[in-house]
Amino acid sequence: CWLCNKPVGNISGIMKTSLIARDRVGIQDFVLLDAHNSETAFLDNLKKRFTEDLIYTYIGTLLISVNPYKELDIYTKKQMDLYMGVNFFELPPHIYALADNVYHTMLSEANNNFILISGESGAGKTEASKKILQYYAVSCPSSTLLDTVRDRMLMSNPVLEAFGNAKTMKNDNSSRFGKYMDIQFDCQGDAVGGHILSYLLEKSRVVHQNHGERNFHIFYQLVEGGEEDLLRHLGLEKDTKRYSYLVQGECSNVSSINDKNDWKTVKNALSVIDFDANDIEHLFGIIASVLHLGNVHFDGDTKGYATLNTNAALRWLLGIHVQVLHEALTFRKIEAKSEEVLSPFTVDHAIYARDALAKAIYGRAFTWLVNRINESLENKVSKISTVIGLLDIYGFEVFSVNSFEQFCINYCNEKLQQLFIQLTLKAEQEEYEAEGIGWEPVQFFNNKIICDLVEEKHRGIISVLDEECMRPGDATDLTFLDKLEEKMGNHPHFVTYKLADKKTRKSLERGDFRLLHYAGEVTYCVVGFIDKNNDLLYKNIKDVMRLSKNPIIQQCFPATEGDSRRRPETVATQFKNSLLRLTEILTAKEAWYVRCLKSNDNKQPGKFDEVLVRHQVKYLGLMEHLRVRRAGFAYRRRYEVFLKRYKALCPATWPHWKGVPSDGVEKLVQHLGYQPDEYKMGKTKIFIRYARTLFATEDAFEICKHELGKQKRTQKRHFNFFSYIITTKIETCWRGVQARKERDRRAWAVKIIKQFIKGYITRREAKTTDNSEYLAFVRQSYLNRLKDNLPKTVLDKTTWLTPPPVMTETSEILRQLHTRMMVRKYVRGITPQKKAQLQQKVVTSGIFKGKKDSYPSSIAVPFVDTRINEQDINMRVLQTIRHERIKYSVPVVKYDRNGFKPRPRQLILTQAAVYLVEEAKIKQRVDYVSLKGASLSNLGDSVMILHVALNDPKQKGDMILQCDHLFEALTKLAMIANKQNNIKVVQGSIKFEIQAGKEGGVDFSVGQEPMIYKGKNGHLMVVAPRIKSR
């Protein structure tokens, strides 16, 4: 900065260091990935970070989150404090960094933002949403009122999860509804309110669950965790197996879910959200009524009409008279002109009516619950300035049988992917073209064709389904499929059994249709599409519900609902319209993205399934997003805005630039030292390629801003100083007479002080009468300080005190004398044994330092003379080799050259040869002349190969040995046989001679656990443990 004479250049170097140096494991921002077009490199980087529990990675400002399926200690209050107010790339990637950046962008630019959290079911979207809410609860300004709002926002999560989440095959806490939450802020950045929108609750789960799945959590929490008095009041028993709606999936109890603890959490959350005791009692009364309704069973009479054997379950249903309910569940009321006729149900119709009522009660109660939470979160005090939206909506789903719910959920994901394309990819390219920035367009798959296939007016699948639901006559799921085949027959993304070729028909049933989504092919079974889309509840049943004494039910079934003769919108149309409204809401806000990935399908900690992750990376469009970021620019601002903010960084633009703003920006960036590849000048905006460039500029601006403030403060101090001088001048004149009387007394003091000052001024000159006393004082002071701060070891080169100029030569002599004294003291303390140790360690260092991964950990381990005592060596062996004098011996594991069977052996080094001994038998003798050398890998294993010259036909091939004291054994061998230059550290594979003319191989790799086994290629496979770099 020119104001403080501090350099701001070399921006790229500064930011690259700050981005990469903080995270040595993988690259924390894919924008910095060299092979940014390589999907393999992308996955390798994700896997490398995941292995080290680094689950977050950036693509510019997009955050990728990989579900670790275990608890990580990265969500503490300390972590939150660390990320507050910090530049986005200043710390390692984290969801707190994204949340903080969104919040400060909202404050600085005063606009609305939203965070789109997307990914498959089980990828961690709900958890990501909760972490963001928790961060805002801690980081935003605090007061009693604001704390109440934040507590209610946080507590809305466990309530909505209990009523809207369930265990599926892929996720034990799967959101079975979509949720969009607006967090409302005032102009000061205080969280003052919130609002929640819910989308398409999977009501069919209330009455039916697939094998291995559960109903909504709240049912099990009530039955398992409810107090005895409450259950007695609701007519329930503490056994989930007694309720038909809870046993269809055959997995009421799940190890990862504690229903009793969750029940306590939900009850506490309801009280925090300001539900009174009556609301809670009525709400759980509805849940219990649904369970009782599921236990209503029908039998057929002689004519096939439905009858009820017992009314026991009906007496618990919402305070409605038993006989009235009995009639509503077994008869349909038909209006014919002015008359009403009761038409009896068949057993199938009665079951349908019962299930439709159960779904309607639960679905409407859920809507009431969301509205009630919104009332609690409503801001009643401050004026709302901006909002941050959180969209946590169902992920893409593919089950063994996919029905109407999966069709709607996957259609929703298509719309969100289309929104992502519009807001990120297309918008980026169009803006660059409008600004005249040269850039090669990035190719991407535009899924508009699939969205149109589903939602197009009069021609889409939803329109065909609605027509079939509303047409007179006997409309069935199969007639709906026929209509689809008639209208969609030639569509490239639609296929049925009838339209498919022979090969494809093998994977399709006659009642299926298949859509080629952006995420892949999904086959849907049309059974139930008509009924689920209609979601009809007979009018007489609605009338009966209005008789309920439960006030929540009275609100859910208002009297005004029965007045309209107009047919209600179908479920699919309602959902389509709600998605269109959601899209409008989101496009009016600035978008931020969290892409959640599943590491594996088994919820297994530490497992990274590359095939599964690759599929998710593809359909989430992450490679396209990376190519856009690398090809394009991370930051762009209008010239006026950019110049207004950063003009203080350049003397030519400060304080006012009178020319064209673009020229001023050009002057500014040249002064800052921007490189040509770091920015481009558009028609109305400057485009900066790297976020780190911008942050370096921002850091320089912060420095200059403080300097400007300092200058203003200095000017104010100068003004105050001159005012003080004028005031004190008058006072000085008055005090002058008194001061003169002191003159003589001070004369002596002045003389002494002057002598000291003169000595200080001439301290660097030769000794004179003027400075002799001062120099003596300096010497004594320095020597006293030096005495108390002498270095304690020879290696300490930094603590010697810097001498004054007069003591420079003396200080150097003293330093040398002190060093020699410490060296002499150290040398005298070295024993002959320690000297021998050091000599061996020097040899080891020369051979292995910087070459073998496990070498650093061996440095502190002392060598011994031998690892096997003579009494442990067989007497026959000792007699055979006693004339050669044993120098060193160590236990090893020898691997056969053929078959690689491990065999325990003793390795004995004598003055003349190497011996491999099995108990009383010498298996191989190699004199040092015939020993060509030794090879070992650069990894952390303990395997070595001794290479033998096969000059003698009787001589066996090379020896493959595993030794726990590898460095010690090879050092002894090198020194005894004088083979220091013949020990090779090799990367990859090592070849060895089995016999003359026949070779084998040993392959080395790194893994989680050390292993040695025979590979399929016939080589010996050695897996070394992963050693963290120091």
Image: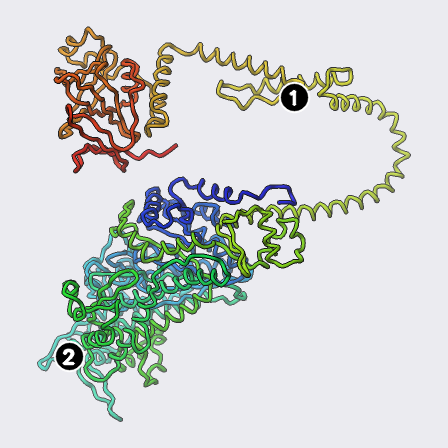
At 25% from the left edge and 17% from the top edge, which residue is drawn?
867
Quadrant where the N terminus sits is: top right
Q: Tag 2's secondary structure?
A: loop
* Residue 995 spot, x, y in % from top left: 15, 24
Q: Look at 90% across and 29% down and name the residue there.
A: 741
Residue at label 1?
804
Q: Amino acid at mark 1?
A: Pro
* Residue type at the position of mark 2: Thr
- Give the vertical position of 1018 relative to 290 (above or below): above
Secondary element under disc 1, as helix, strand or loop, is loop
Can residue 466 be seen by looking at this rendering? yes
Residue 235 in the figure: left or right of residue 131: left
Q: Is residue 92 left or right of residue 771?
A: left
Looking at the image, how many numbered discs can be counted on the residues? 2
Q: Quadrant of residue 424?
A: bottom left
Q: CA distance from mark 2 to mark 1?
A: 109 Å
Location of residue 66 in the rendering, given as x and y in whole percent from the top left corner:
34, 50
Q: Residue at the location (28% across, 36% down)?
A: 1006
Quadrant housing the C terminus: top left
Q: Position of residue 1003 (x, y in %)?
A: 23, 33
- What residue did someone put label 2 on? 346
For residue 290, above or below residue 777: below
Q: Which residue is most to the top?
A: 883
How far across and down, in percent of the image, does residue 162 sit? Answer: 32, 61
